[in-house]
Image (cartoon, rainbow, N blue to C red):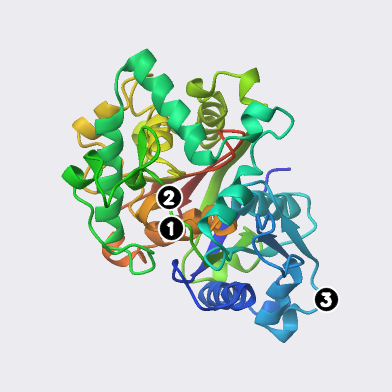
Amino acid sequence: MTTDIFIIGSGHTRFGRLEERLEDLIVEAAREALEEAQIPPAEIDAVFLGHFNSGLVSDGFASSLILQAHPDLRFKPASRCENACASGAAAIHAGLNAIRAGRARNVLVVGAEKMTHRSTPDVTTALAGAGYQNDPAEAALSFPQVFAIAAEQYAAKYGDPLDAMARIAAKNHANAMQNPLAQMHKAMPYEFCREVSEKNPLIAPPLRLSDCSLVTDGAAAIVLSAGDARAQDAAARVKVAAAEHVSDYLPMSRRDFLAFEGPERAIRQAYEAAGITVADLDFAEVHDCFTPAELLIYEAMGLAPKGEGARALAEGIVYAEGRTPVNLSGGLKAKGHPVGATGVSMHALGFRQLTGRAGAMQRQGAEWGLAFNMGGAAVANYATILQADRA
C-alpha cells in the first residue's frame, strides 16, 4: 500500500558551542516542531531520536527525553536510531516506515548531539568508531585522514581538487552568513581557504582546517504525518516524494571509495522514485563533512561527470543564485555538524525552504529539494526528495 507522507512542522535550535544540556536541546526542538505543525502532542503516535553518541555524553539512554517536551507524550513509544553520522536520517526513515506499516499516522522525529564539552581528540576518537575496526590500518585512521585519502586519490585520477575544495568552503561560509542558526557567522574568502597558513593549518594533508566540518552541539526536529491524518489541517506541508537508503561495505578495502557508489545509487534511486531528474532540483542540502565529500556528491547527484565536479562551481550551478544551490544553510562545514542532528536539520530546513519559511536563505519558488545524509565513509547513504505541496 502506498501512503503519501508529509512533513508538517519543523524545529531547530541554534548550532554551535552551547551551554544547554542534551535534554534541553531535544526538548526545545521537539516543542518548536509540534507548535509549527499545529498538532496536539496527544495525537503523536511514536517518537524517534537520531543520536550517534559513541561515548560523547553520559546520558546515553536519550530517546525518552523527547517525552519531556509535553506531558501528553508520556507513554508514546520512543526509540533511538544510530547509524553513524546518518543517525538523523535513520530516525526519519524509522518514522516513515512506522507510518507506511500502519502503526502510526503522526510521528515526531528529533535529531540531537552534544559534542563540544569533550576535547577535540576525544571527539575525533569517537567519530572514528564509525570506521572499520577489524583492520588495524583502517582503525588507525581519523575521518579527516579518510577524506584526505579521497582527495589524494582524486588528484591522482582526475587532477588536483584543492582549488575546488577551497571554493566549496568559501561558498558554504558565505551561505551560513544568511543562516541565523548556523555555528559560524564568519566569511572565509576563497583566498584564505586556498592557502595553508597559521590560521588555516593542515589537519590531515592535503586537508586544511577550512576543509573540515565543525564540532557542534544542537538539535532539530520534524513532524511526519500520513496524508489522511492531521497534515491537511496544518498551515503548510511538504511531501516526502522519495526516501532511499543504500548501505555499502564498511571496510574501505572492499570497495572503490572514490567511486562513491553508495551515494550515487541512493540519489539515483530517489530521483527514479520521485519521477524527477537532477534538472528538476531547486536546491540540495548535502553531507559536506569534508570538502572532498561535497565535490564527490556533485558528481553523485549528476551535476557534473565523474572527475569534473569542479565544473559545478566554475559554472555557478551550486552557488546561492545558481541553478541548483547546494547547502544554502552553510552545510556541515559552516552551519555545524552535531552528528545525530545533521540529517534531521537537512529535512527541517528543506521543509522551511519549500514552505517559504527560510528567511534570508530562501530560494524563491522552490518546488523540489534533495537531502543527502551520509554515515561513515559513504557507508550509510540516505537520499530524500522533498516536494512542495501546492494543493
Instruction: Give residue 108's position: percent from left, percent from top.
Output: 65, 66
Identity of the residue drawn at 60% across and 76% down:
21
Total marks placed: 3
Identity of the residue drawn at 51% across and 56% down:
120
How busy is the neighbourhood of tag 2: few (under 14 within 10 Å), some, or many (20 plus)?
A: many
Mark nearer the N terminus (2 vs 1): 2
Q: Residue 317 lies in what quarter of the image? A: top left
**Circle 2 residue:** 213
Q: Amino acid at mark 2?
A: Ser
How busy is the neighbourhood of tag 3: few (under 14 within 10 Å), some, or many (20 plus)?
A: few
**Circle 3 residue:** 75
Identity of the residue drawn at 72% across and 70% down:
59
In the rendered view, tell whether residue 317 sits above or below residue 97.
above
Name the residue at the top extreme.
Answer: 157
Instruction: Give residue 388's position: percent from left, percent from top.
Output: 43, 53
Q: Nearer the viewer, mark 3 or mark 2?
A: 2
Taking 196 as reference, is 35 left or right?
Answer: right
**The C terminus lies in which quarter of the figure?**
bottom left
Q: Are marks 2 and 1 in contact (CB under 8 Å)?
A: yes
Taking 242 as reference, is 199 left or right?
Answer: left
Q: Secondary structure at mark 3?
A: loop
Q: Nearer the viewer, mark 1 or mark 3?
A: 1
Instruction: Give residue 153's position: percent from left, percent from top.
Output: 43, 20
**Circle 1 residue:** 336
Instruction: Give residue 165's position: percent from left, percent from top.
Output: 31, 36
Q: Amino acid at mark 1?
A: Gly
Q: Residue 244 lies in what quarter of the image? A: top right
